[in-house]
Image (cartoon, grey):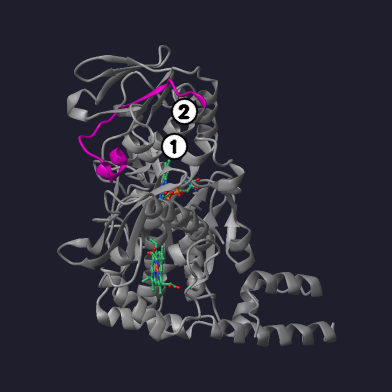
Amino acid sequence: MRRLLRANLILLAAFAFASEVQASEITRAVMLSNSCAACHGTDGNSPGAMPSINGKSAQFISRALLEFREGKREATVMGRHASGYSDDEIQLIADYFSTLP
Amino acid sequence: MKTLNRRKFIKLLAGTGAGVSMSGLIAACGKPSSGRVVIVGGGFGGSTCAKYLHRFDSNLDITLIEPSTRFLTCPFSNLVISGMKTLEDISHDYGAQTDRGVNVVHARVVDVDAASKKVKLDNGKELEYDRLVLSPGIDFKWEEVNGMEAADAEIIPHAWQAGNQTTLLRNQLEAMDDGGVVIVAPPKNPFRCPPGPYERVSLIAHYLKQHKPKSKILVLDAKDKFSKQALFMQGWQKLYPGMVEWVAGSEGGRIGEIDVAKRTLYAEFGDAHKGDVVNFIPPHKAGMIAHQAGLTNNDGWCFVDQRTFESRVHKGIHVIGDASIAGAMPKSGFAANSQGKVCAAAIVSSLRGKEMPEPSYVNTCYSLVGPDYGISVAAVYRYSEDKGIYSTGGGVSPLDEDADYRQQEARYARGWYDSITMDSFG
Ligand SMILES: Cc1cc2nc3c(=O)[nH]c(=O)nc-3n(C[C@H](O)[C@H](O)[C@H](O)COP(=O)(O)OP(=O)(O)OC[C@H]3O[C@@H](n4cnc5c(N)ncnc54)[C@H](O)[C@@H]3O)c2cc1C
């Protein structure tokens, strides 16, 4: 029983720690970037024909979105989609995706 | 460090044989649950909300209540009707939710007690909540249909909720002789998936062209115009010339009465139309539980604060997806997914006593006019006090594009399906 208790205490400590790291801040960047997931996959990891955007640099993403919006980059839907975001918002989104693991 | 969620933690403890109660343990941790959220409906809205609640705060006690052990998506059910996919292909289970620690309960909620913050299940159990989320989808206003009731959908399927209804319509099309008439009767606004009936017409036409080329499709519409109309009509002209006839509501499309046994639809003013296969889609209202909970307006839908999706009737209850009135957003799986995330952020922020940052919402409806012919309508939305949810950008696929462009969009439509089902159910 002593050993069991010890094991439990270790688990408890692990649990408390896990709880701490799993409560994430909800920022404006999160609110904006979560809406890309229905097409690009959760966190930008696409399982199918959509391009993955997870792990791309902030520079790549902001440049792509700005070019899509100005019609300077070939697209089917992204030009129409990017038209809904301001320069500031695009920067927030680009920074967010570049920091994802 | 790999996180250890509460459910796995309990399992581990059970393995050690320690007889300690969960609440005692949490108290011992000094880390009480950050709140109990109960979600009714494991479709696009409810499943997404559960997943993102957990992502925002894994200390929440999240319970997802859904009668079915596998969810069949309406998106791509038109591909099942036309024989391009099977029901298995559009089926998703709740394993990922359970794995992350969401408590999935397969039961139906039969009563909501907003005053004492409890829901009652059809298995007799009761659950308390701090926040309740309803994403029950739709029900039909059979009371507005003359000559047909719910049980008659076995003969005249609506196939507007995926499952047996989908199979029924598929089987009827297969059994029909070449040269037959298929009638599709789309409902009045608002209804789930505004381009859905016209994608269905397209893919039925695709099936008929291959297997029963002398057949015709008659579309008797309750409305005078429809989503992506010019694009659909251009596609029909190109892919299925002469096969589809669309009748606007005010020109004889609106149905006044139905004779189920004769598979005949009587237009409000004008002719009787007999079909060999009839797909009548009744007018919609919010899912039944929203009515039972007293959350609906005279028209059968739920008024919510469009920023948080909290009901305008009862505090502490949020309504998302098809059942809610969400400003400029259509009723779609994509919209329900987007609303599920905003609602999750609103609940977590509120439980933390924090202001939620400005929400952003999005919707795109892809439709297949043929297997290699895709079109889409996209929009991004924001919220304001006076306008509610309004669009800040978007648009439809251009008319007169070449086959390459349509093919790319068809490919992305399939990619979208893979992504959104992973984002909602994975
Ligand atoms: C033919 C067709 C094609 C479509 N194509 C697309 C498309 O391409 N793209 C798109 O974005 N959308 C599409 N849609 C629309 C999409 O299916 C809906 O808008 C979406 O499912 C709405 O999500 P929801 O969460 O509100 O409801 P649902 O996804 O319907 O989920 C509701 C869930 O709640 C459960 N439930 C109901 N009452 C209770 C209760 N009392 N207790 C417990 N559980 C309950 C139900 O069992 C169900 O699982 C299509 C719809 C149709 C009919």
In this orientation, which residue lies closer to the viewer: B247 or B61? B247
| Residue B301 visible in the snapshot | yes
Quarter of the picture holding the N terminus of chain B? bottom right
Q: Residue B342, relative to residue B180: is it above or below?
A: below
Q: Amino acid at mark 1?
A: Leu
Give the x, y percent position of residue B145: 31, 25
Q: Which residue is mark 2?
A: B208
**Element under label 1?**
helix
Q: Which residue is mark 1?
A: B203
In the picture, the disc for residue B27 is: none
Q: Is residue B209 left or right of residue A75?
A: right
Q: Is residue B219 magenta?
A: yes
Give the x, y percent position of residue B121: 53, 48
Q: Dot 2: few (<14), some (14–19), or many (≥20) neighbours within 10 Å?
A: many
Q: State the extent of the magenta-drawn residues as a range.
A: B211-234
Q: CA distance from mark 2 to mark 1?
A: 9 Å
**Element under label 2?**
helix
Q: Amino acid at mark 2?
A: Leu
